[in-house]
Amino acid sequence: MNNASSVSITSWAAWAPGVRTREDWQAWARGELEIEATNEVPGLEFLPSLFKRRFSQLSKMVLQVGHSLVPEGGQIPCIFASHYGEVGRQYQISKGLLDAGEVSPSAFSLSVFNTPAFLLSIAEGNHSAGSALFAGRSGLAVAILEMLGFLKSRPGRECMVIFADEYMPAAYQSL
């Protein structure tokens, strides 16, 4: 008796500083292009400026990739995984607390781990189920396992997996 199931990747998208298009990613896979260690962010031309102005690099990358994957009005469950989530914003909050003794409520509101997935849901009007996974260095593998479990329990459904990270702030790299 064969109980094997199959999973198909119907679409993919990726974005990183210096590696923006499918052709760029293919060059990166061949070792011809590197991800740049910069604060570059995608333009997010599909979003109003006021909506996106305070978002981190991580959130903007997730919004760019998610927008590429979700058809207009699409309701696709999203599994978001990251090694560290909003670590850059968390660093700025911690630094502000140490330097000035206070934390900006607006900065804090966008600092939680699942902020990028939450913002994607709002931006796309996607009200489907979602999960945000922190599994350290196993993040991508755990996200794929979560996706397989989701698809196994809901045959015929679609699901997207977004794995995203930004560079660790220099002050944290030695920890």
Image (cartoon, rainbow, N blue to C red):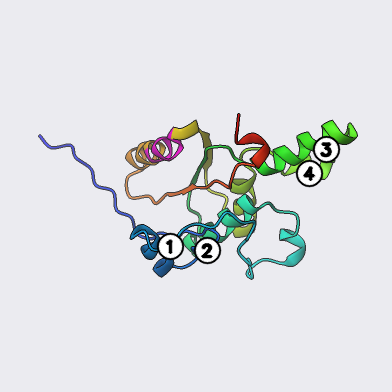
Instruction: Please report the residue visible at 70 percent of the width from the left and 53 percent of the height from the top.
Output: 55
Mark earlier in primary sequence (4, 1): 1
Q: Residue 107 has which mark?
A: 4
Q: How much space separates mark 1 and mark 3, taking CA atoms? A: 36 Å
**How packed is label 2: few (under 14 Cα within 10 Å), some, or many (20 or more)?**
some
Q: Do callouts 1 and 3 mark residues in contact (Cβ within 8 Å)?
A: no
Which of marks 3 and 2 precedes in the sequence?
2
- Horizontally, residue 85 falls left or right of residue 69, namely right
- Quarter the N terminus occupies: top left
Label 3 – label 4 distance at C-alpha: 10 Å
Q: Secondary structure at mark 4?
A: helix
Instruction: Give me the C-alpha separation between circle 2 and circle 4.
Output: 27 Å
Residues shaded magenta: 138-144
Amino acid at circle 2: Gly
Q: Which residue is mark 2?
A: 18
156 horizontally vs 49: left or right: left
Seen as rendered, the residue at the extreme left is 1
| Residue 112 screen position, x and y as percent | 67, 38
**Residue 33, labelled with which disc?**
1
User: Residue extending furthest front?
Assistant: 174
Residue depicted at 58% across the width and 47% down the height:
166
* Residue type for callout 1: Leu
Say whether marks 3 and 4 touch (CB < 8 Å).
yes
Asked whether the residues under the numbered discs 2 and 4 touch, taking CB atoms below 8 Å apart as contact, a structural biologist would say no
Left or right of 133, for residue 109: right
The residue where tag 3 is placed is 96
Of the two numbered discs 1 and 3 on the same chain, state the one appearing first in sequence: 1
Question: Answer yes or no: do the residues labelled 2 and 1 have beta carbons within 8 Å?
Answer: yes
- Looking at the rendered image, the disc whose residue lies closer to the viewer, 1 or 3, is 1
Choose between 99 and 70: the one closer to the eye: 99
Asked whether 132 falls inside the magenta stretch, the response is: no
Near mark 4 (Cα within 10 A), the count class, few <14, some 14-19 or many ≥20, is some
